[in-house]
Image (cartoon, helix red, strand yellow):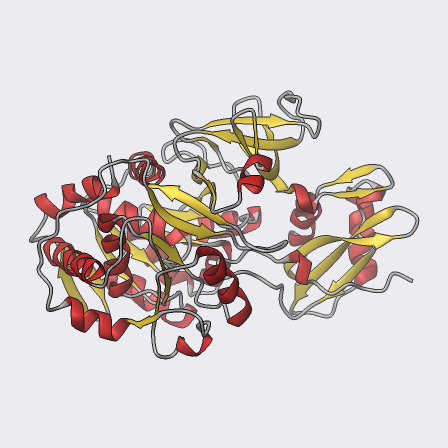
Amino acid sequence: MTLGDLFDISFRTRRDKIALEWEGGEYTFGQIDDRAARMANLFVAKGLRPGDRVCVYLANSISYIDLFLAATRTGVLFVPVNVLYRDREIRHIAGDAEPAALITSPDLQQFAPETANVWLIDGLLAEAATQSAHFEPRVHDGDSPAAIVYTSGTTGTSKGAVLTHNNFVANAVNVTTCWAFSENDRLLLTLPLFHVHGLGNGLHAWLTSGCRMRLTERFQHDRAAHWMSEFQPTVFFGVPTMYVRMLEWPEAAGREIGARARLFVSGSAPLPAHVLEDFRRLYGHTILERYGMSETLMNISNPYVGERRAGSVGTPLPGVSVRILDFEGREVPNGDVGELYLKGPNLFAGYWRREDATREAHRDGWFRTGDIGVRSDDGYFTLQGRRSDLIISGGFNIYPREIEEFLAELPGVDEVAVAAVADKRRGEVPVAYLVSREPLDTERLEAACRAHLASFKVPRAFVAVDKLPRTALGKIQKHLLPAPSLD
């Protein structure tokens, strides 16, 4: 089955049902289908062939949906580009993917590489409007690649993960089934479509379930409460930073929004346990935290029905197998920390033109996630951070998330990140970077750590920062944190 086959259930059986709200307009599934067909015909008319790549460097819009659906029907590989990227990052992706075209808007055109074949979206929409609304799909094999999604590159040059139709279909079926989506749902989607969280979860859950979706260009804290009050969503997908901002809304607004909703989902970065608890008190809902990656889409999820455990990402989704191995490749017992390995229909086809990186990322048919975690006796997984974030200090292993979660619970600490800093005696030591509305009392912080953590886990320094460097989806970029002096 291809994505086209899956989405046709909505396009053919719900043609007259309102599917999308965008910038004050309403569009039926039939209209979305027709727009996609016209764009697909334009792709062909412009000479695009199956296997060609098209980079899409655009903010969220209905035209973004047109382009993605046209790519899935024509066999063109869809390459989403983060709208926050600029010259260097875009040159890397364009040079690596070698797209037949880079589609963007006039306000972003200045950042496109000079060598790129740039197509402006306004002109494409005008041309597509003259095309036929009938298109015979050219993709019939689920193993055909659908997209190349570049990793966030938080520790180095980003790689292009090739995701197939089967990968996306397996993910869409899991998300809609395990999170109980139906055509009666109302999904407010504020996540960027250039990321698999917005694209592979939000967009695909909408089209697969046939629910009604309101799309916004981005999450805006000062407007999102109004959107929720007006649209009355039953489902909202967010990242931890969004939920932190939602805790600032008036208590009455939280109760009203929570009374109409059935599900709040968080991903793309760890959800602090205290945010989950505070949100439950204000909104009356326990946020469902899950775990996914660009290379694998969704892997593990807290249950829709059952315990949503604070700090845990839940249990494996249907068809997904998870193992935890130590750094020598031996399976570890429940309760012991190790690296997560995955296998399943969600697993990407490999890194674009990087056979070496693809081989390195696998062991005996299992994908090495690079994420460190632990499994409980009842099968719940808890992540401890990236393997690359592991701090080895004087021979002791330190998992930064343990320290981060402890510090986040202390009064006055708004956000925190713990990273390794080189040390002549111990090799490396942990340093805490904190965002706080109050002046840092480093002596109090150190005393609290010494009272509750092993001595080797106590940060050597506590650094006040105005904000933590993050990706567009809220993932902290620890390599961009300033290196303090430890004299």
| Vertical position of residue 130 compared to residue 188: above or below | below
Q: Position of residue 242 (x, y in %)?
A: 46, 59
Residue depicted at 57% across the width and 42% down the height: 357
Q: Nearer the viewer, residue 253 or 369?
A: 369
- Left or right, 269 with reference to 227: right
Q: Position of residue 403 (x, y in %)?
A: 71, 47
Q: Position of residue 46 (x, y in %)?
A: 22, 63
> What quarter of the picture does the N terminus occupy?
top left
Name the image quarter holding residue 386.
top right
Q: Nearer the viewer, residue 476 or 71?
A: 71
Q: Is residue 400 visible?
A: yes
Q: Is residue 301 visible?
A: no
Q: Position of residue 433 (x, y in %)?
A: 71, 60
Residue depicted at 55% across the width and 30% down the height: 341
- Left or right, 466 with reference to 462: left
> What quarter of the picture does the C terminus occupy?
bottom right
Residue depicted at 66% across the width and 66% down the height: 436
- Left or right, 380 with reference to 57: right
How many numbered marks have been drawn onto this rendered protein structure?
0
Name the image quarter holding residue 60.
bottom left
Q: Nearer the viewer, residue 182 or 30?
A: 30
